[in-house]
Image: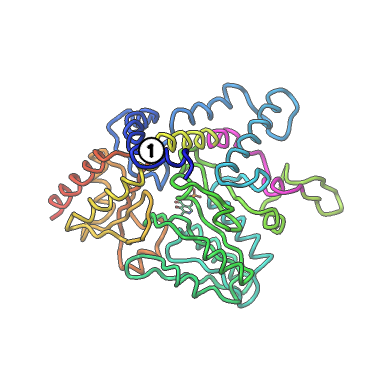
Amino acid sequence: MSNEHAADTGEAIVARSRAGLACERSLFPALASQLVYLDAAASTLVPQSVLDAVSSVYTEGLTGVHRGVHARASSATLKFEAARSQIAYACGARADEVVIGRGTTESLNMLSHGLAATRLGPGDEVLASELDHHANIVSWQLVAAKYGARVILTPVDADGVLAQDAVLARINDRTKIVALPHVANTTGAVLDARPIAKAAHRKRAVLVLDGAQAFRTLEISVRELECDAYVFGAHKAYGPNGVGVLVGSDALLSELPPMQGGGHMVHAVHSHAPPELAKVPACHEAGTPNLEGVLGFAAAIAYLASARRRGALAHERNLTAELERGLRSLPFVRVLGAPAQRVGIVSFAIGAVHAHDAATFLDERCIAVRPGLMCAQPFFERLGVRDALRVSLSTHSQQTELDRLFSALVSLHEFFS
Ligand code: PLP
């Protein structure tokens, strides 16, 4: 083990975790109040450094990414491309493997539209799961039908767990695309992706991983995951809204027909001949990009790296176990899903109390959680649950906040009994 790794274990983490706790919350302007924010899986709050990066675009007058030669346009282009390199570095990819778009949903739709056209025919299958977010189910369902293909959802078991064997058993000669969540938005379950990638590749299928919930909590290396495409967005990783990323190999990005046409994605346009497309990744980036969002995301990635050094991510993982333990100790709570490994997210049902009533009750006590079906209806249907509450942690989450949640849930149970 290297010294650097040794420094990331045991007492060092605990010490840094304590130090991190002291400062983490103060970095987030929205936490100046008593707010207990437990809804990171919907969107994270943003640290001041991200706000500064976003506003710098306007205060410095940066305009015209990839379009101008005046000083501010050149600076905008340089900063945009530097941010792309930072995003690439953060997931172990090369800059030219990173397509920057408007959200995880858009990235998944780019893939489903493109890969359906190049890979799907009658009788073919796209393999997803009941643990997927609607964005990674519906985007495939909408296009598969057009090509006579079908989307198979691997069921979760009675414990809400997506068993690896169940996925592997469904990869067959008809499977052309496997699309799964790296971290599930309902249970925080972490997928062991490599065996699935290997099985998919043996059948010449591609593996798409939805990293929307993984990017803020795990260290990502697309090479180690052996996936063909990896997608995520900024607003669930301490960045601004409106930025999505699609990471793909040169082969995959070159295979994809662009989903949108417009400026920047073409090399030449003619009156009487088809357009000549720009090289990847530019051919997938039609239109003026969201410069402030992308620079904000680069600042968020820098924040995540420093939070990791302070031990805040290790602390968040430890707190996940405390969250699950605390919820399971409440007799009126049914925790949904029991994955072997989970990060930052636990969903649960509370008997007859409607989730919206419960979330409103908690909100009146300044505790923000997510009620409903979390855009994951097949998961809740399988477990026979009408609706649920989801608690999701951030780098700034603290045990005292969980204690406030647990005691508010006890009051809620008494109030509605
Ligand atoms: N995939 C997962 C696992 C998600 O949790 C979400 C959002 O909650 C999405 C995809 C869609 O992300 P967005 O709404 O940012 O496009």
Residue 89 shown left or right of residue 64 in the figure: left
The C terminus: image quadrant: bottom left
Q: Who's the residue at 32% across and 61% down the image?
A: 338
Residue 294 lies in the magenta-colored region: yes
Disc tally is 1
User: Residue 48 in the image: x percent, y percent?
Assistant: 44, 28
Of 288 and 324, the residue lying toward us: 324
Q: Identify the residue at the far right of this view.
A: 272
At label 1, the amino acid type is: Ala
Of 379 and 15, the residue lying toward us: 15
Residue 38 shown left or right of residue 107 in the figure: left
Q: Who's the residue at 33% across and 43% down the image?
A: 38
Q: Find out if the beta carbon at label 1 lies less than 8 Å from the nearest ligand 1 atom.
A: no
User: Residue 248 in the image: x percent, y percent?
Assistant: 63, 53
Residue 22 shown left or right of residue 331 in the figure: right
Q: Where 39 sits versus 199, above or below?
A: above
Q: Who's the residue at 82% across and 45% down the image?
A: 268
Residue 389 shown left or right of residue 251 in the figure: left
Q: Secondary structure at mark 1?
A: helix
Magenta span of residues: 278-297
Q: Which residue is mark 1?
A: 312
Q: Where 71 sits versus 14, above or below?
A: above
**Dot 1: within a 10 Å radius of its alpha carbon, few (fewer than 14), some, or many (20 or more) residues?**
many
Q: Where 266 sits versus 312, above or below?
A: below
User: Residue 79 in the image: x percent, y percent?
Assistant: 64, 31
Residue 139 quadrant: bottom right
Residue 310 lies in the magenta-colored region: no
User: Residue 329 in the image: x percent, y percent?
Assistant: 19, 54
